[in-house]
Amino acid sequence: WLAPLLLYCSYLSGVLTHNHNHLGVFQQRWANVGYGAWLSIFYGFPIFSWIPTHNQNHHRFRNGDGDMTATSRHARHDSLLAALTYPPASSRWQVPALRSFVAAALRARSARATRIVVESGALVLGHAGVWLLAVLRHGPRLGTLTYACALGLPALFGTYWMMLTNYLQHVGCDPASEHDYSRNFVSPFFNWFVFDNGLHTVHHEHPG
């Protein structure tokens, strides 16, 4: 019965991840690195992945030509099936940019390289630790099920929700328009529950 709450929290992990990548929550660099590692556990993927695919690409091309995650790449016409299958397709398109970003950061041994290592390590060790704790407490079968329901599956959905949201906020919009390149969900009630994530155009105009 906690599944709906856990899935809602997995959506919020994506929103918090998105916001943190645009503007670090803390003033201290070490605190931002630690928070990024913590978010990576619940988001289900190292959150540095937003930098080359979202910050540097999507915000530049706004779902138009050059946007590696453009909704038009996936299907000619908008449909429920197109929306539901867009996230895995979008994930595949982002792989080359992620590989290049990681390779360049590791070669340069930059601050980004530290972030990549810390977030990736936190993701693997965090999930392994929770799974081991669940197995020790409940046994292999029930422990694995407990881990999957409590952390594994919600984290797996974290990235899915964000890519689905990207689809809903851009599909059918005009990338060349000054303001109508994205769709907004403006209900104050709805936005209270998702940290104003429905207000997408103003985010593109003021991403920081």
Image: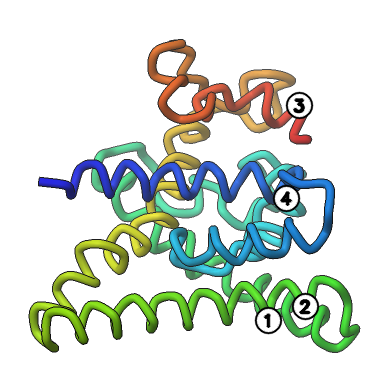
Could you say which disc has been placed on residue 55 in the image? 4
- Judge depth for marks 3 and 2 and give the one in front: 2
> Where, by quadrant of the figure, is residue 53 drawn?
bottom right
**Lower position in the chain sequence, tag 4 or tag 3:** 4
Other residues around mark 3 within 10 Å, as few (<14) / some (14–19) / many (≥20):
few
What separation in Å lies between label 1 and label 4 (alpha carbons)? 20 Å
- Judge depth for marks 1 and 3 and give the one in front: 1
Q: Position of residue 74 (x, y in %)?
A: 43, 53
- Judge depth for marks 1 and 4 and give the one in front: 1
Could you say which disc has been placed on residue 205 in the image? 3
**Left or right: 121, with 66 as reference point:** left
Q: What element carries label 4?
A: helix
Q: Position of residue 40 (x, y in %)?
A: 53, 64
**Left or right: 146, with 17 as reference point:** left
Could you say which disc has been placed on residue 114 in the image? 2
- Judge depth for marks 4 and 2 and give the one in front: 2
Q: What residue type is labelled 4?
A: Asn
Other residues around mark 1 within 10 Å, as few (<14) / some (14–19) / many (≥20):
some
What separation in Å lies between label 2 and label 1 (alpha carbons)? 5 Å
Q: Which of 201 and 77 is in front in this view?
A: 201
Other residues around mark 4 within 10 Å, as few (<14) / some (14–19) / many (≥20):
some
Q: Nearer the viewer, residue 42 or 48?
A: 42
Could you say which disc has been placed on residue 42 in the image? none
Q: Residue at x 71, y 44 (%)?
A: 25
| Location of mark 1 (residue) | 117
Q: What residue type is labelled 3?
A: Glu
Q: Is mark 2 on a helix, strand or loop?
A: helix
